[in-house]
Amino acid sequence: MIVIPSSNKVHPLVVAGLGRSGTRFVTNLLNAHQHVTLQGEIPNGVFGEIKQLFHLLDRHYGNGRNRPENPRRQKEIWEAKKREMVFAVWAFGGQDPIVRIKPRTRYFDYKRPGHEEYFEFYSRIFAPVEAYPVVPANQDVE
């Protein structure tokens, strides 16, 4: 059985970059650490569909329509579940075999060149979000 880490104890870690820029190398390097578990790539098309699913669920559960007697509670329940669901997507949505979660994992995620376009999506779920661009010394960071 694959165990998904609890979002209460584990922080998201996204490795993103241009294609052929070394994201696989950085992922493998980080995965060697006892506190990091990074899954394989999730194709952009797949993640686009996943993002749409979250949007639909936000519309349904985020407005409390499912519990008219207590809409605020419904929204709180969905917000708590959303983080766990993102971790499940990262574990099971990739095209590579699942990487087993290390017992001491504190950072969990996946890698994908080009996924910086989803940072806004992540920032709504995992606020606050910090980004640390890593670029070769001869390039400028915008």
Image (cartoon, rainbow, N blue to C red):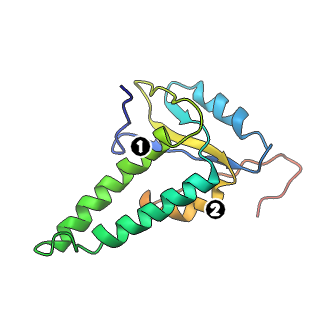
Crowding at dot 1, Cα within 10 Å, few <14 / some 14-19 / many 20+, comes out as some
* Vertical order, 127 against 2 (above or below): below
Q: Quadrant of residue 4?
A: top left
Q: In the shown orientation, is residue 71 left or right of residue 98? A: left
Circle 1: element type: helix
Q: Tell me the kind of residue under disc 2.
A: Glu
Residue 88 is tagged as 1
Q: Quadrant of residue 142?
A: bottom right
Q: CA distance from mark 2 to mark 1?
A: 20 Å
Q: Position of residue 56 (x, y in %)?
A: 40, 68
Circle 2: element type: helix
Q: Which residue is label 2 attached to?
A: 117
Q: Tell me the kind of residue under disc 1.
A: Ala
Q: Of the residues under marks 2 and 1, which one precedes in the sequence? A: 1
Crowding at dot 2, Cα within 10 Å, few <14 / some 14-19 / many 20+, comes out as few
Q: Position of residue 18 (x, y in %)?
A: 76, 51
Q: Position of residue 101 (x, y in %)?
A: 44, 28
Q: Residue at x 21, y 66 (%)?
A: 74
- Viewer-nearest of discs 2 and 1: 1
